[in-house]
Image (cartoon, grey):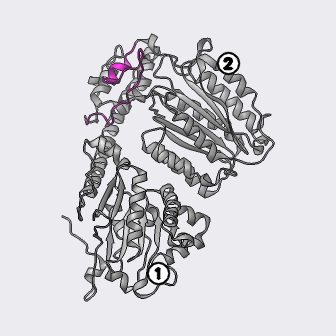
Amino acid sequence: SFFEVPPFLKTCKGSPFHEAVPVALGPQQQAIYVEHTPDAQLARLAEVAFEARDRVPVLIIARDRAQCDQLVQSLRLAARSRGFGVLSDDMVRSLSRTLYEQDPGQWKDNLNRSTLPLGESVGMEKCWRVTVTDPRGGRGTDYRVDDSSVDAQGGLLLIPTAIPTSQRDWTQFLGRTARQDRRGQFCAVLCAADYASLSSKFGEPLPPGSGGTSLEAVDAIIRWGDREVAGRIRASAALYNCGVRVNEICEELFGRQTELLQDSRVREIVVEMCQRLRWMSVREINDAAGRIPGFQPLQLPTEARELGRPAEPPSSGGPGGSIEACADPARQISRPTGSLALRGSNSGGGSVGAADGPPKVVIFCLDWSLSMLSQDTGTNLNRFQTCVACIRRILRDQVRSQDLVGVVGFGAQVDTVVPPTAKGVGGVHVDAKIASLQAQMLGGTTFFDAVLQCLQQLGQAGLAQADAPRWLVCLTDGDDLGSRRENLNGELVTRALETTPPPNLNMVMITVGKLKEKNVRVIDGWVDRVAATGGFAQHLSEKNAAAITTAFSVVADILSADLGGATEC
């Protein structure tokens, strides 16, 4: 059985205890606002925050670091438009992780001032600051309020711009106000677009903000989060059992019935079965293995339980494509040999798997700054020449005739060497263009700007069919130096991945040498974001240039294993 552990102050005799309460604010007098667009959300946020700061300090918790930095600038502009002039920068202060990494002293000063009156205001004329933080500032940070006049007005006002899908995280957010023995209040200003995918997934609209202190929208979001967690647990259990069954079948084939593997068709079935097991139930795995001549999987003992498919397969294959919509993954594996090109073979100079799946788009984003001329690869090639050789090999062996390939180079500036081009149409030109590339003699590494440009190219409307997998493969051998000011820490890339990512995006980031810790975290954040949306994403961090070839070999293996946008490695 479970028991509730009370908050500390509830156990102290004579000590007042308060919890954050919803407060109806703004012209519509609501505790929860749900706006349809980011612009409408910003307008409502400024309206609520600037009205409330006349009475109490305001803490805004942004959806993420990128939105936090954006809101600080936007709210300062809104303050100036309301006539606050030079006070705007002091009135709206940042507590973002970006500021903490750049200037910890300023971050600490902003924290100390977040609950202090603005300027020389005293008595009943006091007015307060609007502080903007990211989710890290929504947990574990102490915003101490000592002014009794704030308590009389309900306490520090918390304005989340997104409700976490986890009840534990939401409790942490609410814990930033009503601290110690002080009162606290909150009013959320949300954007419906942030919850469009969850709403679609569960077939429920996000409840609109209604008058008063209704928390219907908050309850819906947390309920969706609980359902997502339950689904992941179920999918994890199903995937485990599917893996157990495939392992049992492989042990039998490779350990006791090796003669069956002499047939290339059997090997193809086994490879496909291993690559697609996440989209198959235990029954479907048995059905697929049962198509191996002379093999009886139902007579093979098993410890696997039937829990259904871990995940539904992605739709793929354009008109006439050889890969079906995967309604029956087990049946798909039994395609005739003629419809399946063996991966890793390249007869007649054709591209690997020339008939497999929808065309994919691959953009290589390559550092050609001065440092890439270093002769430290352990071969007679410098860093850049090694990269060029590896990319040409991938173009020859892993990119199919229907695939599109592009190349973007970056150093002191970003240049599109080859826009996404079908290999079957312009493959010779693309190869010649790549072969002629040379590292630049200028310093500067505009890596973040280059990644942004690649994402914009991958997201172009009409670039490829909707279900085509899109791959971004980047290599840099140093920290960013020279990207535009608003993208100095990769903020624009982060925002693009969070708001308008290219469909079916996959990402491989290769870094050579030791990068600053903050830049490693930025890159890892991108990788995590792409993985969270269902794409394949990996950060290959190599200590020295001798590993460049190895890193690109990993890329080649990944592209070879790509099956209609989903990759198993």
The type of residue carrying mark 1 is Pro
Quarter occupied by the N terminus = bottom left
- What is the x, y in percent for residue 221? 29, 53
Label 1 with label 2: CB-CB less than 8 Å: no
Could you tell whether 150 is left or right of 117 in the image? left
Q: Secondary structure at mark 1?
A: loop
Residue 374 at what x, y percent from top left?
79, 43
Q: For mark 2, what is the residue?
A: 428
Residue drawn at (42%, 84%), measured in percent from left and top?
A: 125
How dense is the environment of label 2, judged by Cα within 10 Å: few (below 14), some, or many (20 and up)?
A: few
For the image, the number of numbered tags is: 2
Left or right, 205 with reference to 69: left
Residue 165 in sight: no
> Which residue was labeled with disc 1?
117
Q: Give the Cα separation between the discs numbered 1 and 2.
A: 67 Å
Give the label, 1 or 2, closer to the camera: 1
Name the secondary structure under disc 2: helix
